[in-house]
Every structure is written in C-alpha cells, then in structure tokens.
Amino acid sequence: MLYDIRLTIAHRYAGSAGNGRHLLRVLPRQMPGRQRVSAHLVDVTPHPDQRHDTVDFFGNAVTTVTHLEAHSEMSIRMSSRVEITASPGFAGTQLDLAELRGALTEHRALNAASPLHFLGPSPRLRPIADIADFAQMNCDPAAPVAQTVARLGEALHHFMTFDASATTVDTDAAEAFAKQRGVCQDLSHIMILALQSLGIPAGYVSGYLRTLPPPGGVRLEGVDAMHAWVQAWCGPDQGWVEYDPTNATFVGTDHIVVGYGRDYSDVSPVIGYLRSSGKQTNSQSVDVACVD
C-alpha cells in the first residue's frame, strides 16, 4: 500500500510566547522490509531560530526546534509518502507464558529493541491491581503468547467504550480503566500494563491509521488523528507483534508507524516548554490518503 500522509498541529497562545524549545516526533519511520518513506517534509512556522534533526534511543525520528523571539502561534506541518509491505505473518516457535519467562532470563541484549526495556514501570505507567486482575481473567497460561495478546486485546476492546470526551492526554490508565472509557492512548496504556502483569514485554506505538468512510459515505480530508497501539514480545523466534486494541486487530497495512516507546511520554508528537502568559489552544488534523 502506498500512502500520502499530511499532519497539521497548531498551537495558539493568548499572550505572546518566546524562549520555546520543542521536540517533534511526527515522521513515519524507515523500516526495511515493512515501511519505506520515499519523501518527507517537516515545516514549522514561525521559522525556528534553531533546528536539529536526529533519532532518539528507540530509533524514532526527532526534530528539535527553538524559538527565541515572541510569537502568538506555532504550527507544525508534516507531509510524507510511505509504502507499506504486508507482514508475512507469524513464524517460528510459539511459546507459552512459562516458556516466555524462561527465554527472558536468557536474554542479555540491551539495544533499543530489547524486551528488557518493556517489562516494568515507565514514566506514565505503574502496576495497577485491577488491570492485573483483568489480565488474569482473560489469560490461558498454556496458550501461545501471541494468542494471549489477541485474547486480551479483544477483551479490552469489549470492556472499554471509545469516548473522546471521557479523558485527556494527561488521564492516567487507572482512571480510564475505572471509567471504562477513553481513546486509543488509554486503551494502549491499559493493555501494556495488562500484558506486563502477565510477564509479557509490551510497549507503546504511535502512528497513523487509514480510516474508511461508512458504506456510501464520502471520505473527508483532515479529520483523522494520530493513532496508538501496542507491541508485545512473543519470544526470540516470533519477536515483536503489534496489536490495536481500539480496533481489536493485529496491525496490518492500514497502520503506519511513527515511533516506539515504553508509553506515550516516549513518543508524544510534541513536547517542550516556552515562556508565555494566559492559556493556549491546540488543534490537530491528519489525512491519510491511499495513492494506489
């Protein structure tokens, strides 16, 4: 599948802002054999006084911009063309939970893809007893780990109601789980905690998702938003698999990866600071268009 992706994020400040520094993680990743980015552009207005493009520890593209002069708004525009190749599916030995724990005790690598980074607490996630109980109720210890991932994701999909008004970007997983409502960020955080409580390494994936209009409807541009899902380590042979609990499905060619991390804080599209007074308003629009 070939996609053209456009993202716009706008920040408007009630008072003039200055001395700002922001980290942007909005570019799709280059992933040989799965995801190829043939063209891309990240444009920031006003033009930053300093700009630096690099990659972070997890291999995510990061653009750092600095604005020294006063400004009343900042807009970020990203455009890219991405080709997605279908996954060959599961291969190799399938482990159950006990076998997975054994494999983890023998794992020594500490590179960015190491499952050892994704087993415990992270900046926004701490163990929650109610979520661990939910995981136990929806787990068969003798089943292959990938099957456990799917079973737990489906259970969470039915347990939670998608509700964009129920939570904010700062809502923690315990509150969203108690409400049984939230968005993709909430479902992903809850699923990560559930998987980790079973001893399955799990992390957060940010990206874009192609959405289709209802039958007979017209596709609208710019109405999508950035999406989130989960990656889980299923053993040395199968490696990482990705599951989208919001849509109760393993990730396919409709999902475009931007970044991997332990939780949202590692891959948030914009993070930073500035000096200002008064409130600010933010807006985001995403368009994922299939070229072929």
Image (cartoon, rainbow, N blue to C red):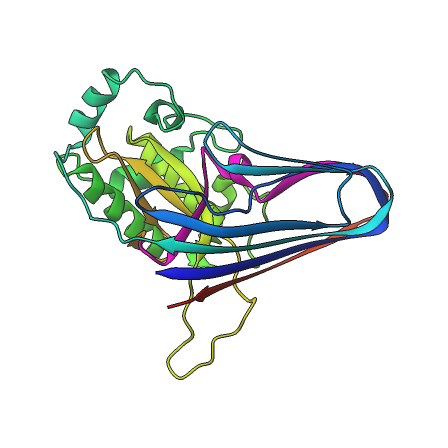
Q: Is residue 254 magenta?
A: yes
Position of residue 47 relative to residue 199, above or below, is: below
Which of the 4 quarters of the picture holds residue 281? bottom right
Left or right: where 242 falls relative to 280? left
Residue 240 on image: x %, y %: 29, 37
Position of residue 106 relative to residue 6, above or below, is: above
Position of residue 277 relative to residue 109, above or below, is: below
The span picked out in magenta is 252-276
Q: Residue at x 20, y 37 (%)?
A: 145
- Front one among 176 and 255: 255
Say how many tags the image has: 0
Residue 37 on image: x %, y %: 44, 49
Quadrant position of the C terminus in the picture: bottom left
Quadrant position of the N terminus in the picture: bottom left
Is residue 80 in view? yes
Left or right: where 86 falls relative to 213? left
- Front one among 204 and 3: 3
Which of the 4 quarters of the picture holds residue 214? bottom left
Which of the 4 quarters of the picture holds residue 121? top left
- Front one among 123 and 65: 65
Is residue 164 in view? no
Q: Residue at x 29, y 31 (%)?
A: 200
Residue 45 on image: x %, y %: 74, 51
Q: Residue furthest bottom?
A: 216
Left or right: where 218 falls relative to 232? right
Residue 51 on image: x %, y %: 69, 37
Left or right: where 96 falls relative to 218? left
Q: Is residue 217 magenta?
A: no
- Front one among 229 and 174: 229
Q: Residue at x 57, y 66 (%)?
A: 222
